[in-house]
Amino acid sequence: MEALFAITLGVMTASGVYLLLRARIFPVVMGLTLISYAVNLFIFSMGRLATGAPAVLGKSAEYGDPLPQALVLTAIVIGFAMTAFVVVLALRGIGELRTDHVDGREPRE
């Protein structure tokens, strides 16, 4: 389970970095989103991965740590707000610069 989780995090992070290096607005936004999802999953995994364990309350010897859950929930809300802001900023850049390249200039081929 841990190996599969680590491989998933690695693939998500590598895909996010690849998309960040594409230098177009939509892939950059998708890359940032993938990296934020990978970080959220990493933080969530710090609360010990367990199946069938109660969240906090219960008559069990082990329970899930509530702090990583709260951090991930906060990060999801902040990530959604930042994604919306970056999309609006990108749309304004496309409107003013007439290109979707991140530095405003089309590369010469």
Image: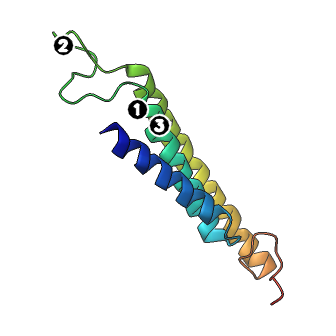
Cα gap from disc 1 to disc 2, whole angstroms: 21 Å
Please tell me which of labels 1 and 2 falls first in the chain.
1
Q: Which residue is mark 2?
A: 58
Q: Which residue is mark 1?
A: 45
Is 42 situated left or right of 78 in this image?
A: left
Q: Looking at the picture, which amino acid does disc 3 mark?
A: Phe
Depth check: 93 or 58 in front? 58
Locate residue 43, reporting x and y percent. Answer: 48, 32
Locate residue 82, reporting x and y percent. Answer: 61, 49
Extreme residue toward the front, this view = 3
The quadrant holding residue 52 is top left
Q: Which residue is mark 3?
A: 42
Cα gap from disc 1 to disc 3, whole angstroms: 5 Å
Say how the picture is coloured: rainbow
Depth check: 99 or 31 in front? 31
Is the residue marked by circle 3 packed among few (<14), some (14-19), or many (20+) residues within 10 Å?
some
Label 2, secondary structure: give it. Answer: loop
Depth check: 99 or 54 in front? 54
Q: Residue at x 37, y 19 (%)?
A: 65
Question: Do residues under tags 1 and 3 come within 8 Å of each other at their CB atoms?
Answer: yes
Label 1, secondary structure: give it. Answer: helix
Q: Is residue 87 visible to the viewer in this orientation of the structure?
A: no
Locate residue 14, reporting x and y percent. Answer: 55, 56
Q: Looking at the picture, which amino acid does disc 1 mark?
A: Ser
Is the residue marked by circle 1 packed among few (<14), some (14-19), or many (20+) residues within 10 Å?
some
Q: Looking at the picture, which amino acid does disc 2 mark?
A: Gly
Q: Residue at x 73, y 77 (%)?
A: 95
User: Label for residue 33?
Assistant: none
